[in-house]
Image: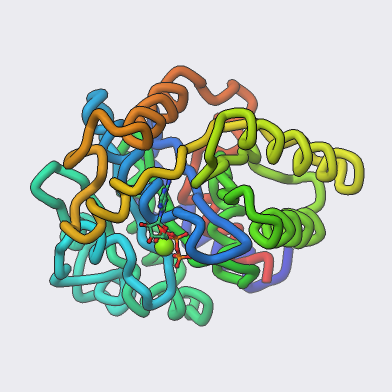
Amino acid sequence: MNDQAAQLREIVKKSPSYDTMTGPMAKIITITSGKGGVGKSNTVINIALSLRNLGKKVIILDADLGLANIEVLLGIIPDYNLSNVLNGKKNILEIIEQNEDGISFISGGSGIRELMFLTQDQITHFANSIAELEKIADFILIDTSAGITEAVLSFCKLAHEVVFITTPEPTSITDAYALIKTFQGQYGEDLPLFKLLINKSETANEAQQVYTKLSSVCKHFLSIDIQYMGFIPFDYNIMRAAKLQKPISKCYPKSSASIAYQNIAESLIEVTVGKDDVSQKNNFFKQVINMFVKK
Ligand SMILES: Nc1ncnc2c1ncn2[C@@H]1O[C@H](COP(=O)(O)OP(=O)(O)OP(=O)(O)O)[C@@H](O)[C@H]1O
Ligand SMILES: [Mg+2]
């Protein structure tokens, strides 16, 4: 550990958030993809709504650089974003926005880009802020941009689970593989749990085949195990809901995609993080610090 990192850890240990960090903490799930437009943002808002309907506290962090998908899909113009926390003008709890269904989210704004160029004081401030979130939520869902960028890899690194979304299209599958390969190359064996969600699938069988192909290639060439998270069928109602700027689970709760989102939300609640995993990973705060001091 270099001097700068050691100094930072000292600052962090002395902070009030570090001492008070007890009890159950949020499960952090990063949703990402190699190719764009595969359905990340829609998945995030609909799983968030399903989890909320199941009584869970969920916060979405929109980490998609400047594109602000979540607020558009929810039809909200946020007053603040992560930049306001980084420049010290707001507390993280003050920038959480809520839509009419109680879906909570934080707009990344340009703050996500700024995260990559923080000073030590700002890192400490950001880490303390994020620790506040971890204490008040059951789930933190991070919606990333598509593709292999430093920011995406960092947000994958700090999650308990990374959900890779692909459609059955070959380019989407090969881009997913490229992202997984880059991730493994950067982080070696210290990997979060990887899951694959197949979106816009015509049948369950087609989705299963995509999973079998991609997971066996990852196993063979990268020695990575990927769990099957399930599939979301192609459903025109998603586009109809998007035009209304509402989640499909709200507008068309009986539609095939809404039922699939509901099943995925239920499976997320059923699976509990293993004990070892909790002790190593269940501290967003420390993960955030690691994310920056490794550079
Ligand atoms: N299961 C589905 N069936 C039909 N259309 C879908 C489905 N899922 C998503 N879509 C449509 O695909 C498009 C992309 O969805 P979305 O914005 O959620 O993807 P994304 O991965 O977040 O995109 P980006 O990479 O640009 O952030 C939208 O037009 C959306 O309505
Ligand atoms: Mg998106």
For this orientation, the residue located farthest to the right is: 220
For this orientation, the residue located farthest to the left is: 100
Q: Quadrant of ligand 1?
A: bottom left
Lateral position of residue 268 relative to residue 217, left or right: left
Lateral position of residue 38 relative to residue 252, left or right: right
Q: Quadrant of the N terminus?
A: bottom right
Lateral position of residue 74 relative to residue 227, left or right: left
Seen at 64% across and 42% down, the residue is 192
Q: Visible in this render: residue 258? A: yes
Q: Quadrant of residue 269?
A: top left
| 119, 130: nearer the viewer | 130
Seen at 45% across and 27% down, the residue is 268
The relative height of residue 203 versus residue 247 in the rendered view (above or below) is above
Image coords of residue 43 (percent x, y): 40, 46
Image coords of residue 198 (percent x, y): 57, 42
Image coords of residue 45 (percent x, y): 31, 48
| 120, 83: nearer the viewer | 83
| 149, 147: nearer the viewer | 147
The relative height of residue 105 versus residue 56 in the rendered view (above or below) is below
Q: Quadrant of the C terminus?
A: bottom right
The relative height of residue 113 versus residue 216 in the rendered view (above or below) is below
Seen at 16% across and 62% down, the residue is 75
Colour scheme in use: rainbow
| 185, 49: nearer the viewer | 49
Lateral position of residue 197 relative to residue 89, left or right: right
